[in-house]
Amino acid sequence: MAEIPLIKFHGCIDYFDGGFALGRMLSGFADKVLESDNPGFAVCQWDLQEVLGQLLIGQRYIDPFPAAGGSQLFSWLNIITKPLIFKMKILYLLLYLLAGFVCHAQGQGKDPLTEKLDSFFRLQPGDQPGIALSIEKRGTVLYRRAAGLADKETRVAIDSLSNFRMASLSKQFTAMGILLLEKDQRLSLEDPIRKYLPELPGRIGDRVLIRHLLTHSSGLLDYESLVPSGQSTQLLDADVLHLLAGTDSLYFEPGSRFRYSNSGFCLLALIIERISHESYARYIKEKIFAPLQMAGSVIYEAGHPISHRAMGYAKDSTGLIVPSDQSITSATKGDGGIYTSLADYSKWIRALQENKLLRLSSVLKRLRFPIAGMRESYYGAGWFIIASSPIVLFHSGSTCGFTNFVIQLPGDEWSIVYFSNLADNISPFRQMVRILQEAGIGDFSSVFALYELTR
């Protein structure tokens, strides 16, 4: 697998992430400069400590935009009075300084992968729902960029703090919640689910184990097929249990085959609640979000505000983009209710790579379930597993208004994360996968066959 030189500046601006307006302003400013084709940007090297020192003591300031015809990037000028510099807000100092370093990065040139990805993003419309991409290795952002609007009504642009509905990427968090309970010896993966969900008939609850729910091998009926016609109110996880309790059939003998099941992860959320004696939302916040400092991440609950929220959209039969944020199945939590951002999801991926919560590789080795007809493909604990060299973890998340993909190479500590607030917006991700392959990073085209299993 080829290395990507860390010369892209977009990663650096995320040091300002944390909800500050400063970070957002600088992010937008940096994007504008990086996209400039001004040939006047020259390569200059200055001592950062000296530059900042001179700024703070009020002796000089930096003009990052030289006069026309100037050959140097920085123009050092004497200021009229020292008190003037003391009255300048630190925001302006940082802005000047940042502009100089952005231009410096521009002057050094870009690697071919960055060039191709930048070219791709420049073609994305800025006035429609869009996409966000982050490529990281060992916790370092190699490329991060967004395009489009998080909310068409307010005209707020997508950035690394925009909270997208994760849809089925939420299953990773639900699975982790169960695994943490197992770690604390509060359940066994071999427990029949009726131990915690006595409402289920014995023919289902006594045969289906927690292990089967985590691997999509339970045979449970799809709750979506059981929803009464004319249903207008949103379903909750408890409603899924009620629907399943009214049946006594399975698609197949538990543990005999793979079939993707949202039903199973709704039941896992209820099992978490009944063992922990806390709501699913509170448990996930206390056990995952808080320890990993994912402060912006939340679980959807109707009527509760979501900061930096990206609203969902879809194309109608004529191709017109229309609001499509919620459906009757959008309020279930265990199978798809989490909202998070590129900035927060990066912390999640890094925690998995560093085994901060538990050793995921060990869990997947004992839990993974083979997928018939898919060579070297398995599923376990919220991840598709491609047993290639290197091992690839993958998942998608699709709902009425969102399209998300994540590819993780845990051995090499790589991650590729793509979020979109437009339903069925898979084409841009296909293009990105093709760009990565052309750049020699790796061929990840096999994930699309796995994606189809979730449809």
Image (tube, rainbow, N blue to C red):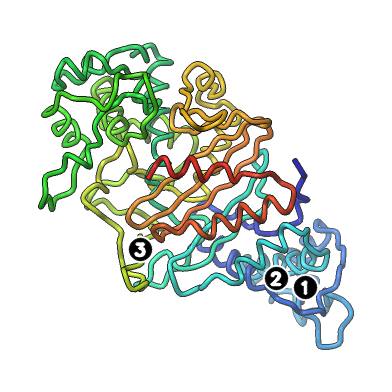
- Image spot of residue 110 (x, y percent): 78, 62
- Image spot of residue 191 (x, y percent): 31, 12
Dot 1: what SS? strand
Q: Say which quarter of the image contains residue 389.
A: top right
Relative horizontal placement of residue 314, taking residue 22 as reference (left or right)? left
**Image vertical order of residue 257 relative to residue 168, above or below:** above
Q: Give me the disc on residue 184.
A: none
Whole-Å distance between the Cαs marked 1 and 2?
7 Å
Q: For mark 2, what is the residue?
A: 96
- In front here: 29 or 362? 362
Q: For mark 3, what is the residue?
A: 313
- In front here: 322 or 452? 452
Q: Say which quarter of the image contains residue 107.
A: bottom right
**Image vertical order of residue 9 relative to residue 203, above or below:** below
Relative horizontal placement of residue 184, taking residue 325 as reference (left or right)? right
Relative horizontal placement of residue 78, taking residue 388 as reference (left or right)? right
Q: Give me the disc on residue 62.
A: 1
Residue at the spot x=77%, y=73% of the render? Answer: 61
Q: Do the residues labelled 1 and 2 touch (CB within 8 Å)?
A: yes
Camera-near label (3 vs 2) is 3
Whole-Å distance between the Cαs marked 1 and 3?
44 Å
**Image vertical order of residue 273 relative to residue 184, above or below:** below
Packing grade of label 1 (10 A; few <14, some 14-19, many >=20) is many
Dot 3: what SS? strand
Q: Earlier in the sequence, mark 1 or mark 3?
A: 1
- Image spot of residue 369 (x, y percent): 46, 23
Packing grade of label 2 (10 A; few <14, some 14-19, many >=20) is some
Packing grade of label 3 (10 A; few <14, some 14-19, many >=20) is many
Q: Are marks 1 and 3 in contact (CB under 8 Å)?
A: no
Label total for image: 3
Whole-Å distance between the Cαs marked 3 and 2?
38 Å
- Image spot of residue 2 (x, y percent): 77, 44
